[in-house]
Image (cartoon, rainbow, N blue to C red):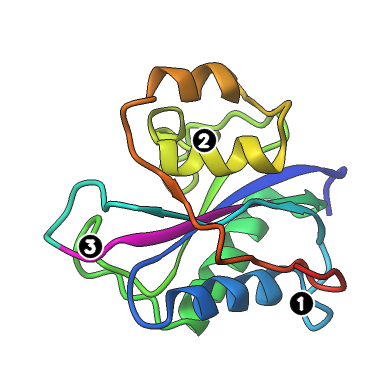
Amino acid sequence: MSAERPAVLALGSNMGDRMATLQGAVDALLGPQAAPGLTPVAVSPVYETAPVGGPEQGAYLNAVLVAACTLAPRELLARTQEVEKRFHRVREVRWGPRTLDVDIIALGEEVSGDPELTLPHPRAHERAFVLRPWLDADPGAVLPGHGPVADLLAAVAGQEADRRGDLHLALPGREG
């Protein structure tokens, strides 16, 4: 285990019961049955967004989780991939439709060029579907190497990310 630092995880789903999948991912990552190493801090509102790149596909529901993390980067990656697998994530087409996508956006101030886990996420600063919910979950958020999330969001203001006021994720042990 490493020292505790914030982990920022972006969740996305555009297949099946998207909302149930996102809530299931939150529960699998942070719920009472989850392995230790992640403690819930905040969850963003849910946004609906058009897919970026890849084949023609349906809209995504997106959210961001912030958790206190004591896992090493590769342990966190293994945890997120295990949760994707539980929700039948298949990696056949790059940027293709998926039941669940869990991206590690940032892990404290960690910077890594590891091709298996680049930190911070190499395209996070370009994506409103990550930045908008992250800013909601943590108004003072800073993306290491890129600056305040509020400033980064202003630079991608033309990208649509529609907040779904009718959908709410609940952190384990708290009401949504």
User: Residue at 39% across / 25% down in the picture?
Assistant: 157
Q: CA distance from mark 3 to mark 2?
A: 21 Å
Q: Measured along the vertical axis of the image, is residue 20 above or below residue 94?
A: below
Of the two numbered discs 2 and 1 on the same chain, state the one appearing first in sequence.
1
**Nearer the viewer's eye, disc 3 or disc 2?**
2
Is 161 contained in the magenta span? Answer: no
Element type where label 3 sits in the image: loop
Q: CA distance from mark 3 to mark 1?
A: 28 Å
Kind of residue at disc 1:
Ala
Element type where label 2 sits in the image: helix
Q: Measured along the vertical axis of the image, is residue 33 above or below residue 136?
A: below
**Residue 164 in view of the camera:** yes
Q: Which residues are magenta?
A: 57-65
In this rendering, position of residue 154 left or right of residue 133: left
Disc 1: CA contacts within 10 A as few (<14), some (14-19) or many (>=20) = some
Kind of residue at disc 2:
Leu
Element type where label 1 sits in the image: loop
Q: Where's residue 145, x and y in %?
A: 56, 18
Quarter holding the N terminus is bottom right
Q: Which residue corresponds to mark 3? A: 96
Based on the displayed image, in which of its 4 quarters is residue 58 positioned?
bottom left
Of the two numbered discs 3 and 2 on the same chain, state the one appearing first in sequence.
3
Q: Which residue corresponds to mark 1? A: 34
Number of dots carrying numbers: 3
The residue nearer to you, when weighing 7 against 73, is 7
Kind of residue at disc 3:
Gly
**Nearer the viewer's eye, disc 2 or disc 1?**
2
User: Residue at 45% across / 35% down in the picture?
Assistant: 124
Q: Where's residue 55, x and y in %?
A: 12, 59
Q: CA distance from mark 2 to mark 1?
A: 26 Å
Q: Which residue corresponds to mark 2? A: 131
